[in-house]
Amino acid sequence: MKKYTIENNIIHIYDKEFFSPKESLECGQIFRFYVNGAGNYVVISGSNRAEFVETKEGYDVVSNDPQYFVDFLNLGYDNCEVWRNICGKSEFMKRVAEVGRGIKILKNEPFETICSFIVSANNNIKRIKGILNRISAQAGSKIEGSEDYAFPTIAQFKGLDEGFFKSIGAGYRSRYLSCLAENYEEFLKCNPQSLDTPSLKRRLLKILGVGEKVADCILLFAYNRYDVFPVDVWIERIYYQYFGKENISRSEIAKRLIGEFGENSGYAQQYLFYYKAIIGE
DNA sequence: GACCAGGGCAATA
DNA sequence: TATTGCCATGGT
């Protein structure tokens, strides 16, 4: 069975088992989304916007650019096999993956992703969302046919100074954000898509405000490198609860979990994060 | 009023 | 390379 079709600029997704807008958006990989008056999830990625309307067989994606969202939603990637593989790891992982079965790892816009996870450092999701929305509303352009604002372009971002970011509540991350546009343009010269994961990570780490964990998030959520395992406070907690008692560093936790999940590390990480940080089990 | 949030930087050893 | 103090802000 075909998993999706496009008709009149609407993507019809024929899948409810392994794709849920709610789970895919709420699992912490993206911050610019909301539930509208009709009860539908709306997501904004870069300068694009999509609304998810539930149908009998799945979801209709109503957007300004269907091709962008076919790519964004990774509709050509079969997460069913990944899910089965992770379920087979243990009874515990089966329970965790069952809760987050509808999660699909998205392909978010790189510049926005880098900015988002710089903001995420030592922060909470509610406040991260607020900061990113204020940056967009005050520096981005309105998306045609909606009341939502695009994430600022690199050119728009260049005009923002440290004072601006402080004024919208970004705190000490303002220094990193004020030079991000320049740093990103320099970063682009390495031709990110062409690099293998370790090389791309080394290059990301040169961006001010990007450390180990943030780099891993960018690798996973913008470049879809599934062999990384971002370790934050929540993953650290669940690791000590269910995987090992020995006190080790976050990078060592990442190394051991990658050893366990291999090419499916990114998905395992999202299931675990969703289970612990969002659902709260 | 302390503690916490999807940590990272810069100094130090 | 590994450790440590510090960093802004809003929620609980």
Image: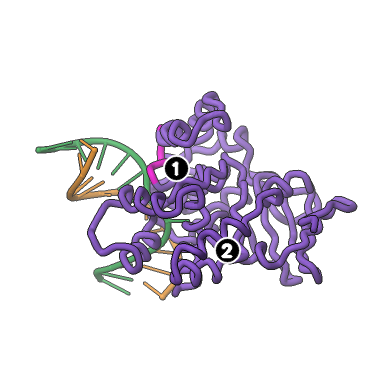
Chain colours: A purple, B green, C orange
Tell me, yes or no, whether the highlighted magenta stretch contains residue A83: no
Query: Which residue is rendered at x = 45% and y = 45% of the image?
Result: A216
Find residue A3 and report its horizontal and vertical position in percent. Answer: 76, 56
Q: Is residue A48 above or below residue A270?
A: above
SS for dot 2: helix
Find residue A271 and report its horizontal and vertical position in percent. Answer: 51, 62
Q: Nearer the viewer, residue A164 or A115?
A: A115
SS for dot 1: helix
Residue beneath label 1, please? A215
Can residue A166 be seen in the rendering of this structure? Answer: no
Q: Is residue A128 above or below residue B2?
A: above
Residue beneath label 2, please? A26
Q: Is residue A3 above or below residue A207?
A: below
Q: Earlier in the sequence, mark 2 or mark 1?
A: 2
* Magenta residue span: A206-212
Find residue B1 and report its horizontal and vertical position in percent. Answer: 25, 71
Judge the density around disc 2: few (<14), some (14-19), many (≥20) Cα neighbours within 10 Å. some
Query: Which residue is rendered at x = 52% and y = 25% of the image?
Result: A190
Mark 2 to mark 1 CA distance (whole Å): 20 Å
Query: Which residue is rendered at x = 23% and y = 58% of the image?
Result: A247
Name the residue at the front extreme.
A88
Q: Main secondary structure of the magenta part?
A: loop
Question: What kind of residue is marked 2?
Answer: Glu
Question: What kind of residue is marked 1?
Answer: Ala
Name the residue at the right extreme.
A8
